[in-house]
Image (cartoon, helix red, strand yellow):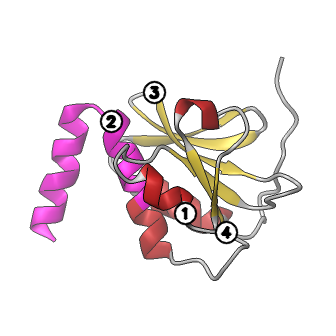
Amino acid sequence: MSHPPTYDEDDPFLSELRSVCLGLPGTAEVQAWGRPTFRVGGRLFAIFESREDHPYAMVFRPEPDEHPALIQDDRVYVPKYFGPSGWLAIDFTAAPVDWIEIAELAESSYRLVAPAKTVAALDARRREA
């Protein structure tokens, strides 16, 4: 059974998040649970979430050692369903969005699940830049 979409294509922040996530090697956008999810090697690393209490957010998997500091940030919350597995979300409406920070959080999440060969391609691309 497919879930109805919980977002609109013209939602604020969605095109920017797509650009960040799909700019990483080997990534794909997959519709799941009614929302855009971003994956590498079939594994989830980011989700565009829209809920009543947090209209626009990115759900991501933080580095375990960064989790305690991130959760102290007023923009960051524990998302429903993914929170028990250690995932966090950052609310895009809580403050002006720093897209460099969002790119860093997305990349950290990506690195936790991406195949080693794909991470090596990202590192090689960074060295060439």
Of pointers 2 and 3, the one earlier in the residue sequence? 3
Nearer-the-camera pick, 101 or 65: 65
Choose mark 1 or mark 2, whichever is in front: 1
Q: Eyeballing the image, is 70 above or below 39?
A: below
- Residue placed at 68% from the left, 44% from the top? 79
Pick the quarter of the image with the C terminus: bottom left
Label number found at residue 116: none
Local packing at callout 2 (Cα closer than 10 Å; few below 14, some 14-19, many 20+) is many
Quarter-of-image position of residue 69? bottom left
Name the element at disc 1: loop
First in sequence: mark 1 or mark 3? 3
Report the amino acid beneath label 1: Gln
The span from disc 1 to disc 3 (Cα, nearest Å) is 31 Å
> Are the two marked residues, 1 and 2, in contact with CB atoms closer than 8 angstroms?
no
Whole-percent x, y for residue 106 in the image: 44, 55
Single out the mark in the foreground, 1 or 3: 1
- The reply, left or right, for residue 34 in relation to residue 92 is right
Quadrant of the drawing holding the N terminus = top right
Q: Main secondary structure of the magenta part?
A: helix
- State the residue position of label 2: 114
Q: Which mark is residue 72?
A: 1
Nearest to the eye among marks 2 and 4: give it: 4
Closer to the observer: label 2 or label 3? 2
4 or 1: mark nearer the eye:
1
- Residue type beneath disc 4: Phe
Give the spatial CA distance, label 3 vs label 4. 26 Å
Whether 106 is among the magenta residues is yes
Q: Is residue 97 visible?
A: yes
